[in-house]
Amino acid sequence: MVSTFAANANWGEADITITVSDAPLEIYIEGGNRLIGTTTDFMLSATKSIDPEDPTLSTADWDWNWYCEDWTDFGTTNSLYGYGVDETQLTDEYIEEYKSFVPPGCLTTAGANLMLSIATTGNDELYIPAGAVPADKLYYFIAMGSIGTRNGKGYVWVEA
């Protein structure tokens, strides 16, 4: 109950409900958002991610899952996946095309599921061997980190 008084007069009372929720994890991925060669290994690392409630906690103690989406057919830019994009500057047609696009999973050069062919669970780093990503592909890698019921998600792209 909150009350407001002035000159010994009650100006009003109200009940206020304050809901406090846990801060989401902040996921930062290094090693992406770049062109890659098909003959070179590369590593994506989420080790710089932070827990705003305990910044000293190592990301090695978090639970991790990595995913990959093939955005090649959508185009070489995906503004709605980007950080800091002013969506008011995008056309309605672009937004509708984005909403209707369902990206397939990523495939290796040999046509196998990329994420099944590399270790993707439990690690804050993702190692992708040379030759795994086919030429002329735009892949978005997604890292999902969690601690108990709290989680966060980060994205980076690579284009071979």
Image: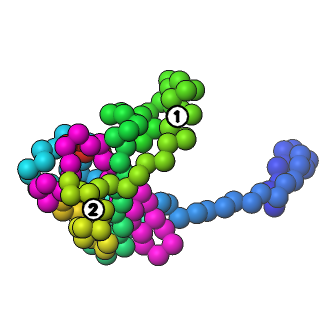
Mark 2 and mark 1 in contact? Answer it, CB < 8 Å. Answer: no
Q: Which residues are magenta?
A: 129-156
Local SS, label 2: loop
Question: Could you tell whether 7 is left or right of 16 in the image?
Answer: right
Q: Is residue 151 left or right of residue 48?
A: right
Number of the label disc, if any, that sits on residue 97 = 1
Q: Secondary structure at mark 1?
A: helix
Check if residue 46 falls in the magenta segment: no
**Secondary structure that dominates the magenta span:** strand
Three-letter code for the amino acid on which mark 2 is drawn: Ala
Residue 48, horizontal then vertical, whole percent: 26, 58
Q: Nearer the viewer, residue 44 or 133?
A: 133
Q: Is residue 58 visible?
A: no
Q: Given the current orientation, which residue lies at the most extreme right position?
A: 9
| The label number, if any, that marks residue 112 in the structure image | 2
Residue 56 image offset from top left, x and y in percent: 30, 68
* Left or right of residue 30: residue 16: right
Residue 105 at least partly seen: yes
Residue at screen point 48% across, 47% down: 102
